Image (cartoon, rainbow, N blue to C red):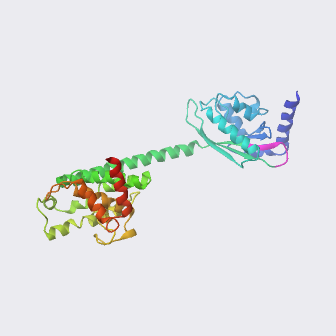
Amino acid sequence: MNDQLLAHSMAAALVAAKGFQPVIDALSAHVALIDGESNIVGVNRAWRSFADANGGLLADYGVGTNYIAMLDGMRECPACGENCNNDISLAYEVVGGLREVLEGRVKKFQLEYPCHSNTERRWFMLTVTPFEAPGPIRGVVAHEDITALKRSEEEALLQADRLANAFSSTISAISLFIEKRDPYTAGHQQQVARLCDAIASQLGMDAERRNGLRLGASIHDIGKISVPAEILARPGRLITPEYEIIRTHPEMGYDILKGIEFPWPIAEMIYQHHERLDGSGYPRQLSGEQICLEARILCVADVFDAMTSHRPYRAARPVEEGIAELQRGRGTIYDPLVVDAFMNFVAISR
């Protein structure tokens, strides 16, 4: 027996003598104990069982093998050492993390990695930690099977996608129904939704919040379901009682949606989209920060599209008039930051 093999055998014997073996055998993770030179001096029962089940070719389950050298020359799984079709580029990340732990530069290295066999999809969490007790052991390498957790995460993501698609389909159906009752404003809600998204993008709003704004904007006139169709389609100007009925649509929209647990404040943004910064809007005369940002964006987009689109009682006004209206009310009835974001979008689009 050469000196190196003798040293490894002595280290392995020391692992057993110090009582580490029963402790690591009780762990569900696949554990290897390594010395300061990154040689494997002991492994646990789970490590051996995993190697047996996956056709491991390392003699004595890797005890006596240099872990870093094994990874440096690896063409199989970079973390567990088995033939699991893993990306070998991960091996170099593991080597770097292992060295940092052994050299005392970090207290822990972790890496989540796939370890798929030909028959099943598996994921593991590799954790390397220092071992500071007296003796040859300087690090603990553990591979924890997190397959069940990853499958749960994947299912949750699929469920979230299905839910989002259901939300989107439902909202599209509602939007279409509203516009069928009011053909003169067909396409208005979708155009407002596009403008809202463009403004929100200029403001740096995150994608998830923009998605909620876009969906809310696409049904912002849902409350008009309660308005008689003959009022919506009247070709002349409305008389006062009819106009008062029209003005109820934000509150009616809120009442329709308030019981639905959207992940965004859709009911509230619909309730507030006719409020104005100076408190001159309706139905609650909210002002300033009392109005949510989504509603302030929706207000600007709604006003611009309403002015520049055809209505039963007037022709569409020029785009320049819509821009002039927003500039006139900037800082008084319209949020100045929202107006500026809209102007930036217009400048980019031209």
Q: Looking at the picture, tell me which residue is in the foreground, 302 or 161.
A: 302
Observer able to see residue 256: no
The magenta stretch spans which residues? 133-140
The vertical placement of 150 against 209, above or below, is above
Decide whether residue 137 is among the magenta residues: yes
- Numbered disc total: 0
- Tell me residue 192's x, y (percent): 29, 54
* Residue at point 26%, 62% (across, down): 325
The vertical placement of 333 against 55, above or below, is below
- Tell me residue 43's x, y (percent): 75, 38
* Residue at point 83%, 34% (across, down): 8
Q: Quadrant of the N terminus?
A: top right
* Residue at point 19%, 52% (across, down): 180
Which corner quadrant of the image does residue 297 belong to? Answer: bottom left
* Left-right relation of 230 to 7: left
Q: Looking at the picture, tell me which residue is in the foreground, 167 or 335.
A: 335
- Tell me residue 134's x, y (percent): 85, 48
* Residue at point 82%, 49% (across, down): 133
Observer able to see residue 37: yes
Decide whether residue 307 is among the magenta residues: no
* Left-right relation of 221 to 83: left
The vertical placement of 40 against 231, above or below, is above
Q: Looking at the picture, tell me which residue is in the foreground, 301 or 284.
A: 301
The vertical placement of 236 against 174, above or below, is below
- Tell me residue 277's x, y (percent): 34, 68
